[in-house]
Amino acid sequence: MITYTAKYSKLPSGYLGQLVEWPEVITEGGDLEECRNMLRDALKEMMMAYEQIGKEIPLGNALIEQLPVEVGHVGQAARSC
């Protein structure tokens, strides 16, 4: 079993879904559930395509971490560079 990390971004038309470890697997859906289902389908299709051409499937299991930063400090750092 391989686990991939999905990233969802809100769009005016719905959601964009993409795999962090395999950025070529990307899709859109009208709502989050539709996008999630379409992303699963896109992943299955990409895995089959890679297997057919003998290309190695990217490993999953990425560690995702949120890094908090104070917004006031971001602008100060950018101006001092």
Image (spheres, grey):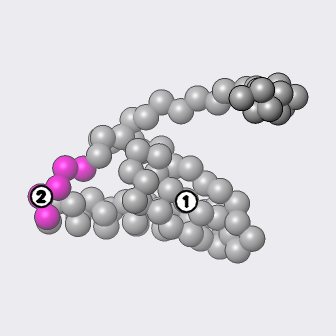
- Quarter in which the C terminus is drawn: top right
- Judge whether 40 appears above or below 63 on screen: below
Residue appearing at x 48%, y 30% in the figure:
63
Q: What number of labels is visible?
A: 2
Callout 1, which amino acid? Gly
Residue furthest right in the image: 72
Query: Alpha-carbon distance for marks 1 and 2?
Result: 26 Å
- Looking at the rendered structure, the secondary structure element under dot 2 is loop
- Can you identify the residue that label 2 sits on? 54
Residue furthest front in the image: 81
Q: Which residues make up the magenta segment?
A: 53-57
Magenta-drawn stretch contains 54: yes
Residue 79 showing in the rendered view: yes
From the viewer's side, name the closer residue of 31 and 12. 12
**Relative to 29, is 71 on the left or the right?**
right
From the viewer's side, name the closer residue of 33 and 75. 75
Residue appearing at x 17%, y 55% in the figure:
55
Residue 4 is marked as none
Residue appearing at x 41%, y 44% in the figure:
21
Could you tell me residue 28's position as x and y percent?
A: 56, 69
- Can you identify the residue that label 1 sits on? 17
**Relative to 57, is 52 on the left or the right?**
left
Could you tell me residue 38's position as x and y percent?
A: 48, 67
Q: Main secondary structure of the magenta part?
A: loop
Magenta-drawn stretch contains 58: no
**Relative to 11, is 60 on the left or the right?**
left
Classed neighbour count for the residue bearing mark 1: other residues with Cα under 10 Å, few (<14), some (14–19), many (≥20):
many
Could you tell me residue 65's position as x and y percent?
A: 58, 29
